Image (tube, rainbow, N blue to C red):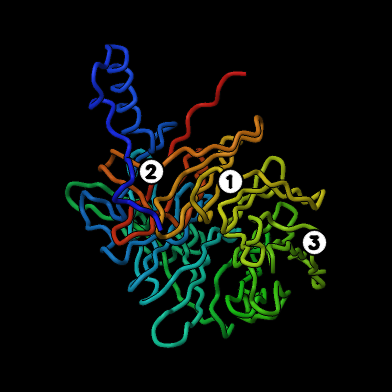
Amino acid sequence: MIDLENRKWPSSPLKAKDLDEEQIKQFLYIRADYEKSAFVTEGHLEVRQLGAKEFTNAIPPGESGITALLSHSNGHIYGATSGPVSHIFFYNPSPDADAVADIGIIAENAGIAALAEQPDGTVIGAGVRKGGATKQPFLFRYRPCEVLLREKKFQGMGVREIFDLPAEDQLFFSTIDPCHSSGELEVMPCPIEEPVEELVLAPDGKNAFLTGGKSGWIYRYELASGKAEKWGRLDCNGNHSNRLIVDKTGRLYGAGLYGQLFTGETGSSDPGFHKLSCRAPSLKGCELYNRVTAWTLEPDTGDLYGGTVDGLLFRFVPAEERVYCLGKPAAQSRVSGMAVTGGKIYALIGEASDCCHLCVYEPDTGENRDLGCLLARSERPWNGYRFEAMTAGINGTLFLGEFDRISQLFLYFPPLGKKR
């Protein structure tokens, strides 16, 4: 037992006698540096509340925890929240907007696991209703304004009615009638009889692949017919990772017991789902509990990067079927989100009880660094603690989804690359 009463604690340097001028200066420098040393100082951070503050309230406290983000081909960022009421929203980065619009309510008492984009721009999502003793899975479809416009018939419409049709999801900051335009949201039944914890799409957008949270089965769901079938199993006892990823060639990857990697072909009637000879890295003695908690694709090389429940990062090279452990850049555990921008791989690391850290891996140099905790001063002062999602926008900005009682959408602008 530690004897705290008789323990000798370090005293402040200022209490020491006969400090010379150099010692005092050093102490002041140390104090100034220490007070800001925990926070991200590379690049720039901002936040946006989940609602255009000029004319609407944000998504209410308790309903604003972001659990899924999607970088859409139209340049918008779509997100979903989980809680007593689950919402879907979009962020419009254009200069005349730069704000978040709440599209609407997806479901009550729901957790949203993932969002994905079909080739035509339709957003598909998966979630679980948490009311009662059972968890009921469901899917939903959101069709943005540009998707609806492509299908619109103009016969019989007047000029005013035609010109009032929105061409895209956007915000109008008019002083007379501020508002926003958004598309159509549809909740769809899910034939799977267990909680769905992940959703990814095949490259052609015809089939969605869903992870069964209890059984370890991956299901193939045909979006046109609404039919689902068992596609491949990660682990017979449910000791598997929920997260999946599809690479540039259309192959799907997941992880089972001990972080063992599996793969299958999404575009074939015979997927050839099988176990690979490599595992995600783990801390010694923790192999049984190993989970891959985040994935991201490096589009230039085709390599996959992953993060684990231990806070380890790794690179998987599909052509070699080999895993390279990149190390553990932060003291925290559990990688909750990963994204690639500017040739660098960024990761959010931190459990529910931790203050989440933003980390970066630089393939050119092999550096793996902890950038620090997330603190923004614009558009309002805000400390970010817990995060559950991250994605990279088409202009290189990173978007981080906070998961707290009152949550913000964080924007991270990475620093410019150094000249070689």
N-terminal-most mark, 2 or 1: 1
Where disc 2 sits, the SS reads strand
Image vertical order of residue 66 relative to residue 372, above or below? below
Q: Look at mark 3 in the image and give the residue it sits on.
A: 276
Of residues 234 and 115, the one drawn nearer to the viewer in this rendering: 234
Q: Look at mark 1 in the image and give the residue it sits on.
A: 328
Distance Cα–Cα, label 2 vs label 1: 19 Å
Distance Cα–Cα, label 2 vs label 3: 37 Å
Q: Residue 406: x, y in percent?
A: 29, 58
Which residue is found at the position 43% from the left and 88% from the top?
133
Which residue is found at the position 68% from the left and 40% from the top?
300
Q: Residue 171: x, y in percent?
A: 32, 50
Q: Quadrant of residue 145?
A: bottom left
Q: Look at mark 2 in the image and give the residue it sits on.
A: 374
Of residues 97 and 23, the one drawn nearer to the viewer in this rendering: 23
Specify few, some or many for label 2: CA neighbours under 10 Å numbering under 14, 14-19, or 20 or more. many
Where disc 3 sits, the SS reads strand
Q: Which of the numbered marks, if any, corresponds to residue 9? A: none
